[in-house]
Amino acid sequence: MSTYADPYASSRETTEGTVFSVTGGDWDSLVTEIGQAKEERVVVNMGPQHPSTHGVLRLVLELEGETVTEVRCGIGYLHTGIEKNIEFRNWTQATTFVTRMDYLAPLFNEAAYCLGVEKLLGITNDVPEKANVIRVMMMEFNRISSHMVALGTGALELGALSPMIFCFREREKVLDIFEFISGLRMNMAYIRPGGVAQDLPTGTVEKILATVKDLRHSFKDNEKLLVGNSIWMKRTEGIGYLDLAGATTLGVTGPVIRATGLPLDLRKIQPYSGYENYKFDVVTADTCDVYGRFLIRINELEQSLRIIEQCAEKLKSLEGAPVMVADKKIAWPAQLAIGADGMGNSLSHIREIMGTSMESLIHHFKLVTEGFRVPAGQVYSAVESPRGELGAHVVSDGGTRPYRVHFREPSFNNLQSTSAMCEGSMVADIIGAVASIDPVMGGVDR
Amino acid sequence: MSEDKQGMFGAHGTGDTSGYGGLVASAASAGSAQRPFGGYFDQVTDDLERAYPDFADAIERVVVDRGELTLHIKRERLVEVALILRDKLKFEMSMGVSGVHYPDDANRELHAVYHLLSVTNNQRIRLEVSVPDIDPHIPSLVEVWAGSNWNERETFDMFGIIFDGHPGLTRILMPDDWQGHPQRKDYALGGIAVEYKGAVVPPPSDRRSYK
């Protein structure tokens, strides 16, 4: 045992061995030290383990009194090497990895990636209509659940506790829908190259319509808590200012750029998965501040509900339609079904490959172990995620595995604007500014 | 285990004994496109040629593939062309830099790929710069699009491409003292074998591959 005495971790002997109590810095000596310093400048480290930095984000702040003069972000604490890992998996397996990047928007990760793979395969127009409708519906539900976390935690970080309780209650309802449809609440790898993993269970349309009605009612409670609330306005109005020029040069997208008045929404300007067939409005604000971004998220909820209702209408006439491309050389032969004990292999498919058709078994085996080949080339496919443009740069060398996939993560680019938003503001306003960017560190670091 | 015995049934190459994989097309990348390119691509290239007289010298190749336009550009001309694309052709936003490592592409091993978006004209194009592994320098575009800052740091971190003129080219995702650049093809994935009920599952990079 070392006898070295650490001023910040005093030790005592117990029967289990030495126990250290880590106490952090001694505040009194820090204050004395600062009092003796000639300059007012203090460098404060905020995070990566800080309750209000939205995950493992580290902010290095230079302060003059209570004014922030410089902000630097430290990221990389949640780097998981997903882009490297999927180079060693086949094209379909990669969906289970990318879904874990931005863990609040798994379906958008899958969609951006799968749209890229489909573009490389040249099957974009062969994806069945029902698969597209399901994708749109799931993405819009996901936008709601993601915005619920953004609004709930954003309010929590600024000291408003009740919205968190309400928002997470609504989010649960959306996650229940995900569980009902895909078997999983998060990270569901539901969207696959060529379509979606399995068809909707019976009774989906009724269930989603009931949930939409329920959500629309409960969103009103949420709005009453914060919209126009004078304390909330004082913490958010004019805070975290970023205008159009700044947002453009920094590559900022999503609610942050829409809060500068620019209706930049890929669902409208570069539609994918059939978004051109839905009626919805792009929500903007012109305040360039935290309150504007907050209002955009609040109002986007209603637009998402509108789209989901239109999806439900379309789904009524698509009963029994295919949800995966017809090409059996690409369509994953998973044939999953939701049984009493959750999602698993469809028994009728098992019966076919194990009992009646040797060719089906070979086909299944080859496709699952080897995967399909994707013609060489590179594409960029982008979707409008809750945080902005989520792009996938997908490169194939003609093999059964991705050669290189790079994700243009909206959280990553948007987080760069922290310095522009916060320098010159008060320390307390950093929290509101970062919350309004809504970075998800799983996406930032990948 | 003997070294020369690999794959099932003694098959070499793909290990494919069923013929399922079919004929393998050559993995050559898409060749240069001929006019007309289609869509707005003709107009974009025309406008760029008009605004930038050295077009023929700066642009090595124009590739149109799967409905996307790629301009392969010489690295010394990158900043000039980027400025013209931003100011004259209204590509206001850079959607980031993505690196790709092609170890077999002699003297052009490292590629930096820029995705540009024009909000005004609702257009997208891609710039691609190739540099040799032994001289991985590309001029930085931070002065053109400030948002390139983190993207270039990421590409440096992952591929070792050095962006000259970058205000602070340090690692961003990996720790500062990390050795090597993880996304390069010569950087091993790592991982350990896992034992499960007596069988050993090798790490992903050592499993059978169907390249």
Image (tube, helix red, strand yellow):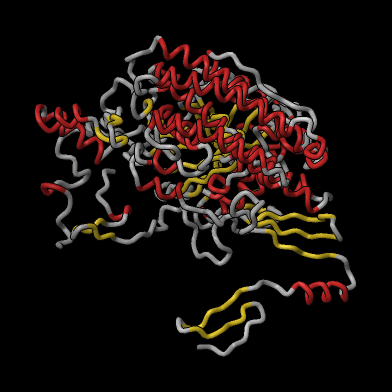
Question: Which image quadrant: the N terminus of chain B?
Answer: bottom left
Q: Residue furthest right?
A: A38
The answer to whether B106 is drawn above or below residue B123 in the figure is below
The answer to whether A428 is drawn above or below residue B22 in the figure is below
Lateral position of residue A135 relative to residue A144, left or right: left
Q: Compare residues B100 and A315 and report the one nearer the observer.
A: A315
Residue A31 horizontal/vertical position (percent) = 82, 72
Q: Compare residues B64 and B117 and report the one nearer the observer.
A: B117
Residue at 42% x, 44% y is: A97
Lateral position of residue B173 relative to residue A257, left or right: left
Q: Compare residues A335 and B122 and report the one nearer the observer.
A: A335
Residue A154 horizontal/vertical position (percent) = 67, 42
Lateral position of residue B134 relative to residue B187, left or right: right
Q: Is residue B59 visible?
A: no
Residue at 44% x, 37% y is: A185
Residue B3 horizontal/vertical position (percent) = 18, 61
